[in-house]
Amino acid sequence: MGRIRVLSDQVANQIAAGEVVDRPASVVKELLENALDAGAHRIRVEVEAGGRKLIRIADDGHGMNRDDALLAFERHATSKLRTADELLSISTLGFRGEALPSIASVARVALDTSIGEDGPGTHLDIAGGKIHHVDDAALPRGTTISVSDLFFNTPARRKFLRAESTELSHVTALVTHYALAHPEKHFELISATHTLVSAPPVTRPAERIYQIFGKDTLEQLLPVAAETQLDHAGLPEPPPWKRDPDEPSRKPGTVRVSGFYSKPELQKLNRNSIYIFVNKRLIRDRLLLHAIAEAYRNIIPPTSSPVVLLFLEMPPEEVDVNVHPAKTEVRFRQQSLIHDFVRDSLRNALIAARPAAGFMTALESSPAATPSLIPVPISRLPGAPQDLRPDMPPDREGGVVDTSEAETFHLTSRPLTPVPGKLPFGEREIATHIEQQTMREVAAALMEPPTNAAGHLGCSPDDIDRASSQQSAQAGAAQVEADQHVANLNHLGSLRPIGQLKESFILATGDEGLWIIDQHVAHERVLFENILRDRQVEKVQRQRLLMPLLVELKPWQMVIFAQIAHELEQNGFEVEPFGPQTLAVKAAPVGLEGAALERMLHQVIEQSEAPSEASLNEDLTSLRTRIAASIACHSAIKINTPLDPKRMEWLLLELAKTEHPTSCPHGRPIALLYSWKDIQRAFHRI
């Protein structure tokens, strides 16, 4: 008898479960995607013990009949594919038919489903991949699936699960992601008796962000929207012998991007707050992460990352989602086009918005390595999951290392959300007016109660709560957007300088309030963009030195200099070797001389020390911007330098002409606004 055997279905399913199901959050992901593919409008997720004990997901989708319910737990049984060609244009979240049998092989599963017609529904019990009970049941339209005792028959896998709080945080993050991608649907997440996420349907993504993350997060985000027409289809036409003469030729289609990006003042030390959705599928893609980093190049420090919620929509055939077991990675047919489109869209949005950094916000903000954006209800919980505390180190899976396995997870009642407002004396703010208008609309709606699903007049408490949440999100998002429209740097040129602070910061006034401008980084931004512009047209201004400047280098630095010598020459330098470890600088860009010139050369060479940067294949754009930033930094007006009013006015006018007056090339803020509203509030005028 040979040594090779065909594995049983039970073993094969458990092996597949190792790829698809690694923790409770992956179970929730697969079941959530099934509910969304079924056309559900309301999805309720319940978990106990972080998902170890119970995961229950109920939806109001189209449901299944008895035969489909039984077939759904067979390997590679799916309603979403028929032929191999359909793999090239997948428009659903799930398609392999592996999730349900894999989950059922390592847990106890109960399924209740109905198509909502006159026929009965179906109840199904499965444990360890074996069907124990099937029966008819009177059920409403939709599907409810319960997964209990996860990994009960694979104790080794269960042992590697983390603490309940850690697993709960992963489930919470997952539900939050899909709620962001589908603002038109109702999502609920309940842990035991506590509601962690409650997101009724809204009309706009901004309202969904306000619902989940709150006002403070939305205030730091700005919208982006763009689209481009593809020149050609990503998939080639089939050969003539396989082509259907009646089938029309493939049209290129359109790529659209929408979402939100953070102001430069909001920075993270990791990429955990970058959410990317492709055709409403949450992914992690290096290509798009690189495009986002390039969009923020020379706007935030290279060691920091922004907060981005990005939604890409494109024809299904332009993206291959069948490249990862968990479907969290994709491959684009036209990678360069997608990369450049995302980069340019974000970059152009930053140029157009020119957001102003608030003085009070700048005092409190600093780059932080938080696991991700935190939903408001979670951040307020006394027994919040340990992942959501920023003082804990991240683990290799993107979560955190839980150092309190034995800590009790305390459940408390959800605190009431404070409602800002004031008595209607004197002037009334926009937010107060909107809230009062909202309350009048709700009251008017209650005066004429609608007919409920049972045919009776009246509103249920859930309906009232849903309407109140929707109105609150709409009003809050509108107020935040109104404030964002005012706080920008479009009026820098019209500011009136009133003096200097410590001969280092320019104080200026405008209609928005009091401005504080760092004179060094402001001039640095002006010079940086001028240098790049002159370099592009090869009109860099240089000055010859009366005596050559000798610069001593180490042997390895001489090697790096040889690699970047041509680009230095294009930026106004005339440098040649003067011995084995010495350079003779005969000319330099205007504004650089003496010790500043020597420091600049050392800085550029040392920044190219890393192997990835010192290679001959280094990105030319990165090298150019690094050289330009170093020249600008060493040539700019220094602190402790007195400026007369004319010089200050000139600097503000030149800064207003730049594309990114928000920050210097190294990511430091240039101008801070102490708004008129904040000044009034500080003096208790409002």
Image: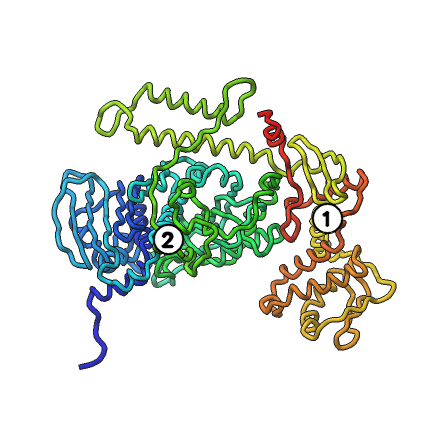
Image position, residue 348 (x, y; %): 58, 46
Q: Which colour scheme is used?
A: rainbow
Question: What is the quadrant of the N terminus in the image?
Answer: bottom left
Question: What is the quadrant of the C terminus in the image?
Answer: top right
Q: Quadrant of residue 451?
A: top left
Q: Determine whether 632 is above or below 13 in the image.
A: above
51 lies left or right of 644: left
Q: Residue 520 carries which label?
A: 1
Image position, residue 357 (x, y; %): 61, 41
Q: Is residue 578 visible?
A: yes
Q: Residue furthest bottom?
A: 1
Of helix, strand and loop, which one carries label 1?
helix
Q: Determine whether 175 is above or below 71 in the image.
A: above
Query: Is the residue marked by circle 2 packed among few (<14), some (14-19), or many (20+) residues within 10 Å?
Result: many
290 lies left or right of 570: left
Of helix, strand and loop, which one carries label 2?
helix
Residue depicted at x 64% and y 35%: 674
Q: Can residue 292 be seen in this view?
A: no
- Amino acid type of the residue that numbered disc 2 sits on in the rendered structure: Thr
Query: Is the residue marked by circle 1 packed among few (<14), some (14-19), or many (20+) residues within 10 Å?
Result: many
Q: In which quarter of the image is residue 485?
A: top right
Image position, residue 253 (x, y; %): 45, 49
Residue nearest the observer in this picture, 549 or 627: 549
Which residue has dot 2 on it?
166
